[in-house]
Image: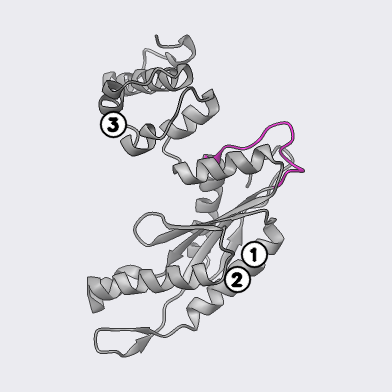
Amino acid sequence: PVTASYIVLATLSAPALNALIQNAQLIDAMVAGTLTEAARTTFMLVDPALVATLAGPVDVATAREIVTGAPPEILNIVREQTLSAEALTLALLDIDFFGQVNKTHGWPCGDRVLREVAELVRANVRHDDWVARYGGEELCLVMKRVELASALRVLDRIRGLIAHHDFRDEHDEPFQMTVSIGAASLDPDTYAERPPAASTLVVAASDQLLVAKRSGRNQVRPALPTPGGDAV
């Protein structure tokens, strides 16, 4: 059954209304623990590999997060940190002018740049911090038990290391690259009554990444948590 709260308006177009109903059905199935194999193939709004990892019922908030496309690893980490009342900082790193690398030096060189940037990030964070590719030339870094002020020092050090790193082209000639970084944090002192969703953190970090890009690139921009628990 589709819960009434999801059938919002008949003013939606037919495709939009159908998608809304499918989302509602998928959320209801997740919450009830009745997600079938047929549902997994029917609802391609969600990565089937992710859906397959769900064991039994999940809460409504988790189901909504999954349907909206929040990466499962981020979802799980945010949930864990919220339950344990610990800080967390999420950062999105975007390689500046990455398209020019592929255009000038070719895709193999671009792939090497991505790998080397990821290696520089991984080498300068703790072993239990989560680092993964997120989009075309973006990386996502999730630092558990790290408040924003401490995370910003780490992120700025990573930014500087990348800016001074010698990348190599197809002729083994060195060239430089920079990254822009947006960050957002969970502060247990601010979300006691209303924990923010994983997607809220991702959006806040993404917004600050855009600010960094528009402000000249090669910089770190933080989203400051508000008393309500969201980041701005």
Question: What type is the residue that disc 3 sits on?
Answer: Met
Mark 3 or 1: the one toward you: 3
Above-or-below relation of 180 to 77: below
**Circle 1 residue:** 152
The residues tagged by marks 2 and 3 sit, at their Cα atoms, a distance apart of 39 Å
SS at circle 2? helix
Mark 2 or 3: the one toward you: 3
- Residue 192: x and y in percent read 74, 35
Badge 2, how many Cα within 10 Å: few under 14, some, many 20+?
some
**Circle 3 residue:** 44
**What residue lies at 61% left-to-right and 41% top-to-bottom?**
80
**What residue lies at 41% left-to-right and 82% top-to-bottom?**
176
**Circle 2 residue:** 156
- Residue 161: x and y in percent read 53, 79
Say if the magenta span includes residue 157: no
Query: Taking the image as drawn, is residue 178 in sight?
Result: yes
Q: Earlier in the sequence, mark 3 or mark 1?
A: 3
Q: Which residues are magenta?
A: 187-198
Above-or-below relation of 169 to 87: below
Q: Earlier in the sequence, mark 2 or mark 3?
A: 3
